[in-house]
Each structure stands twice: as structure tokens, then as C-alpha cells.
Image (spheres, rainbow, N blue to C red):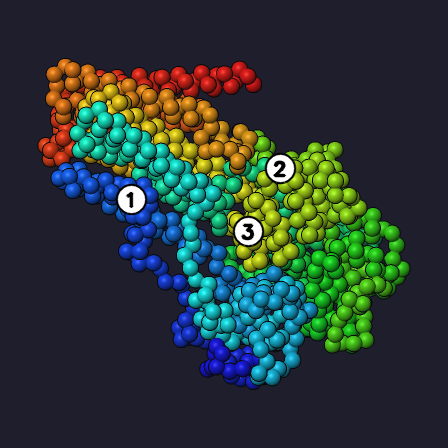
Amino acid sequence: MPSGNDLPWHALDVSVVVEQLKTDISVGLSSNEALSRLASVGKNQLPVGQKASFFLRLRKQLVQPLILVLLAAAIVTGALGAWADSSVIFGVVILNSLLGLFQEQKAASALAALSRVLVTEVTVLREGRPNRLSAEVLVPGDIVLLNSGDKTPADLRLVSITELQISEAALTGESLPVFKNLDVLKTEVLLPERTNMAYAGTLVTKGQATGIVVATGPLTQTGQISDLLTGVTKLSTPLTLKLERFSRCLLIVILMIALLSFFIGVLRGESWVDMFMASVALAVGAIPEGLPAVISITLAIGVSRMAKQRAIIRNLAAVETLGSVTVICSDKTGTLTENRMTIQQLWVNGLNYEVSGSGYSKSGQIQHAGDIATIQQNLRELIVAGVLCNDAALEHADDAWSVVGDPTEAALLVLAHKAKIDVDTLRQTFPRKAALPFDAERKAMATLHDVEGAHVVYVKGAWEVLIKRCAMQLDERGEVIALDEQATKVAQLMAKKGLRVLALARSEVIDNQSLHDRHISGSLVLLGLVGMIDPPRKHVGASIQACRDAGIVVKMITGDHPATARAIALQLGLADDDAQVVSGHDLVNMSEDQVKAVVVASHIFARITPSQKLDIVRALQSHGEIVAMTGDGVNDAPALRQAEIGVAMGLSGTEVAKEASDMVLTDDNFATIETAIRQGRNIFDNLVKFIAWTIPTNAGEGLVILTAVLFGSLLPITPLQILWINMTTAILLGSTLAFEPGEHSVMHRPPRNPKASILNRFLLQQTLLVSILMLIAAFGLFEWAWQSGRSLEEARTLAANAFVMIEIGYLFSARSLNHTLRIKHLFANRWLWTGCCLMVAMQLGFTYCSVLNHTFSTAPLRMLDWVAIVGAALISLLIVKLMKWRHFRANVTMQ
């Protein structure tokens, strides 16, 4: 069986293609044959780009400016004969690099796992039935069904099309969509001119098609150039870039202060070797070695957490931006509602029918005046039209019915089952001859069938559009009579109840082979109206209220009728009874300034076109709003790209929408957006907590060394001891803040200004205070022990432990940015307690283990020493808490 490009598929007749690939257009492959071919040709996926070697990734870790300074210090100290110091510095560099490698790999693995979640699904004909399968299992000979918005999953030879246009810009560079046809072409025709082919990775912008898979994976046209597209994703965000700049500036300041200290000491007559070691100690103390690694792992952990909450982050920068969102523009159908349409009311020539049951369950009845309705000719004709003018299918699996296709069309199939009409038999009896697919401009769908010797066109679409094209209607015997105004009044009443209203109509044509817009432009016979509801999702109302509490405005943007949109908005608490509903028609007739004003003031937008979504986003951004926009269609892509956070639907969204988005909802639920914003704020809070905790620690160590040099005193702490403190506390203490649960107030404060600095004025003041407290405690305890006649090792051990204990105390304060920690939340982070216990155990070993005493020049302490250390830590913690309490009390008083 040939596949790939070993045959000029575009130059072969369809019958030859079918013969070559041993398939059947109307049936497709059998499951066993598909499995056999999959084993032979492999999965339909492109080769993964070659990863950088271990040594290249290690080199990347070692060339960071902060690490280069440590390497230089290790080399020079080794040259001076301080082998212990040199060995430990080298060890710290290697440990930090290995930690960075591990965290980088974990972050990359997390993103790779998330990308696998977004595997493309495609409708494939297998054993005569359409199935939704992963594109990875496609094989040559499969029959694929394409619709507007789909990404072509493999190279296809087209066998049937309906107004098909495909954007091939990703493959050929052609900016305009290509109109497709079924003509057999010459062999020498170039790739951009092969109009009977659809190639992997291209996007269906309009129409429908059926195609035979002729090439998959690396054998596709896209696969042949995939080596140009492979590469490593750079895990950087505006925050990490800002931190990199901060690190470079910090390094310059540290080196300048270290050099200044060195020259001051030498000028005062001190040994240049001693001054160099003091300068090394100062630099080592002030450098936050663990900062980049902990930032990366915090982001990776946050992204993984959000994935578990059904929010897939495609762009790490979105994690930061989520905390700044001020407006959410949400679709209604499937996002605010369940997207499980249920028909509740029918109207046929003056008679109203009620339909029981819910969702896609086939249990339920059609009733009239409280009794089971008789399916008369006009009612049957309405139901038949709903089945034949329909692309959906219902599948039964795991004791539940699922939909392949549009939920609205699925509801029409369920209605037929409730009327005891067999859908499969009906479709086989009256097969489709031609079709006009639904699109945003036409607002209707039409299909052509041979019915009892006549060429009948069945049409369904928006009632306000279709009724205008109707001149007649059916009576109860199925006879054609003049249309009256009652249909319009009934449709309006249905819409006011929150029902989505469809009209169904028919006409007869002469030609039984083709169908055009002129066939449905007028003189249709109205068959009736169908009123259905898509109920609001559970918990969405609570999520909308949570967003309001967080200072985020929620706006509904839908293509539905204004009355339907208003009814759903009222049910969700999105608006009150006096809320204004703005329609797409209203926006068309407004000036640019008027649009900007009404977009800010209104919360419900109905009958909005995809292009108007983009206008709404831009209008909001002109007012300085940070916008999250949801979308699922091809034409939603510009608005998703324009918004600060584009949110695509994972279940119902097209591939175009997903690729244009920053975040994908795997459950299409608005409540997940609120959860993602909450998580985004938590992640940023935890990053700020770590930065606010680690900076004063390094600054305090640097201040101790600088003070000793300026006053000509002995160093209270050595470079080795500083490295011990920095690495152990960063791993065991600081990294645990990444697991800190969100604060109760995280959704009760306004969005963060993206231009604001990472540390606000209060946190900077707190940082300075903690640095000074560390200086006083460590230097004070060192001098107290040294002046009391204790050994230098004991005095330095006292100072080192003071640093660590103050860091542990300050860690508990850093757990909350906006409040003092509440008792009930004290044990909410088990990782933090585990880290603290391990840190205390490490310090006991640092103090009492003879091997570590010899390595780090430490000595055992007395019980009174520990009382002084713990006392200094508690006093420091109380001072920080008092500062925090005074700050927030002042804020409450001002409010």
C-alpha cells in the first residue's frame, strides 16, 4: 500500500486513490485494518526535536553571572591554599547547577505533558460510522470529515467538498485562503496550486469536506520541513526577565561594594589575603544563589496546579498576567452554560407543544395541552426537517449519550427519538444530495433531498432571519397556507423565556445536484419553531460573584438573541432587571467614541459577530483594562490574540482558537477561568513571598561582613558558613513557599497593576528592617561571645545559627503578604513545617557533628547560647509582626 509522496495523489482520479489505498469512501477502514496500518506506518506525529545534551545544559547553568563570580572566588581561594573554602564553594556551584538542571527539566516536562493534553481530535469514518479520534491514530486510507475551524490532521486527497476554503499560510506562505475543488490536476502542478488536496497543519476557514488520508506524520508535506520548526521553548516570562536584570544589577553593586571593602581594608594595613577572603564572604553572602532556580520551579509548580484545575497554560507569561485581569469577556454557550441543548417547546401552525426530558437523554415525551401529542403531518414534517438538515450524530457509551457535532443539532435528533422516529432509517431513506453549511453571514443551513419524487430543500436557522424569507406555512394536514404574524410573536415570547429559537422551513427546486444561496433567499414554507434551552452551569453564578469581589468585571458576549442573552444573564446574576443589552446592530450604528463608552458601561452583548469581539477588546483596552477574552471559533482568533489573556475552549474550540490563545479550558467552564485567576494570583503572591524572604537574608549577611570590614573587626561569619546558610535555607526553607496555599483575601483585592514593581514600598521597608535585625543579632551575639572569652569558632557558630533562626521566624511572617498569619492557617503548608524541621536538624549537625565542625570551623554551643539565639529570633519576629500590624491597621483606618 503506497503512502506519503511516492504517488502524485493530486494527479490521480479519486477512484484510483481509493484503489491504491484499499479503502471505501462511504465506510472507511475497519478497526482491525486501522490498527494493522498504525503498527506499520507509526503514529501520525512529527519527530520531536533533538534535546540539548546534558553537558550543554550544564554549561548553561554555569555561565550565569552570579555563578561565574562564585567560580572565580573558588579558583582564587584554592590558589591561596584555602582548599577547604575552595572545595565547598565548588561543591555549592555544582549543587546549585544540578538543582537548576533538575528544575529546568521538571518545568520542561510539565509543559511537554500539558502540550500532550491538547492532542487534536478529528472526525473519522470507521466501519461506516463517524468517530471522534485522536489525530495521532490516523493512517493512510482513513476517511476524514472536515468542518470550518478544523486543522487538517494529515495530507488528504479531497473527495467531496461544500464551499471549502483552506488557509495554507503555514505551509505555502499564501496569505489568502485557497478555494478547493475536486478537479484532477497535472502531475507537475506545484504545491500551492494543488487545489484538490488538503495538507497537514493547514486550517479550514470555511465549508466542509471529506478526504482520504494519503500521508501521515513525517511523510506529510509539513513533516518534510519539520526540522526547520523544531526548537527548544525558552521558559522565560516578563517576571523572570525582570529578575535576570535585577540579578545583573545586584551583581554589579555587590562586586563594587566587595572591591571597596577590599581596598579599605588594605589601606588600613590589613592583609590583602584576609581582605580578599572578607570580600569573597561579602559577595557570597549578598548573592541570592537560589533565586533563579526557585522562581522557575514556582512557575512550573503553578502551571501544573492549574492544569489539575482544568486550565492549560500555553504561555508562561499568562501566569503573571492573570493576576492583572480587570475584565473577562465570556461567551455564553458552553462557557456560562452547559452546552447541552434541551428542546422544551415547539410551535407548529398555531399549536404549542411541550417537550419533557433533559439533556441528550432520549426519555421524554411531546405533549399538547397536558396530553401525549399525536404526531400529525405538519409536526412530523418539522421533526423530519430537523433530522435531515443536520450534521450531528448521537453515540451511546458508558450508559450515556454523547454528541458528535453541534449541540443544537443533537437536540433535534433527541426530539426525533422522543417522537418515535428512527433517525438512521430516515437518513438512509432520504440521503443528502447537496448542502449549504451554516455560517455567520448566512445564519442558516440548508440540505437537498429527494422526497417522494420532489427535490426538497430543508432549511434551519435563526428565526428572525428565516421568517423573513418565508411566505407560507403548513396547516395540520400538511397543506400550504399563507403565513401570518403569529410565528413572530411566539418566537419573541420564547426568547423572553430564555429559550433559543430556531425556525425550520422548506422549499422545492428544479436541480437535484446543486444548492445555492438563491434557493433559500425567499418564498420558503415555514414548518415551525423550536424553542430550546442551554441551562447555566453549576457554580458559575458563584464564580461571577467571586470575580466581582476581586474587582473583575464580567461581560457576556454571545451570538444569541438579546432576549435569550438577557434571560441567562439574569439567572446568573450577571446583571439586574434594568441592565441594557447591546446588540451587534447597535454597535454598527455607533461612532468609535460611542462604542468605547457603551462597551465599558454594558455587561450583556448579543448578536455580536466575531469581528465585533475584536472591536470590544480594543475599546476596553483603550480605557486601560486588562482583558481576558474567551472564544472557540476560527473568527474568534483575532480577538483572542488581541486580548491580554486569550482563553480557548478545549472541548468545543477549533484548533485556530487554541493556537491563538494563552490558556485553554479543558472543560469549557467559566468557573475554571475564575479558578485560574485565583491560582495566577496565588502563584505571583508566592513568588513575591520568596523574593521578600530571600533578599533581606542575603542583604543581612552582606551587611555583617561590610560592618566588620569598616570597623576593622573579625568576620562574624566565614564564606563557607555563608554558603552553608544560603544553600540549605534556599532549598529547605525558601522553596517551601512555592507550596503555600492562597490567602483568603486573594480574591478580595483589586487586580495587580502589571507596571508595578515586584516589591511595594512596604515590602521594601520590611526588607530593610529584617536586614538590620539580622545585622544586629548576628554581630551582637558574635561580639558578646568573643568579648566573653569564647573561642572564635563558638562565636561564629553563634552568629551563623542566629541567621538561620531569624530566617525561620521570618519565613512564617513571609507566608502572608497582607495580613498577620492566622492560627487556623498555621499548619496549612506541611512542606514548610517539614523544611523547618529538616533545617533545625541540619543546624544541629552543623553545630555538634565533628566532621562538619572541622569543615566549617564551627564548635558546639551551650544551652544558654540557644536561649540567646531563639530569643533574638523571637524578638526579631515580634518587631516584624508589630511593623506589619501597624501598617495594616493604618490602612484599615484610612479606609
- Residue occupying the point 70% across, 60% down: 439
Residue carrying label 2:
624
- At which x and y percent is residue 835? 28, 34
Q: Which residue is mark 3?
A: 661
Give the distance between the C-alpha atoms of the residues marked 3 and 2, in whole angstroms: 21 Å
Tell me residue 659's x, y (percent).
54, 56
Residue, disc 1: 68
| 53 w.r.t. 850: above or below | below
Which mark is nearer the camera, 2 or 1?
1
Total marks shown come to 3
**Residue nearer the viewer, 654 or 427:** 654
Badge number at residue 643: none
Tell me if I can see residue 423 in this picture: no
Quick one: label 3 or label 2, which is nearer the N terminus?
A: 2
Vertical comparison of 105 with 217: above or below: above
Instruction: From the image, state whether disc 3 or disc 2 is nearer to you.
Output: 2
Does residue 755 appear anywhere in the picture? yes
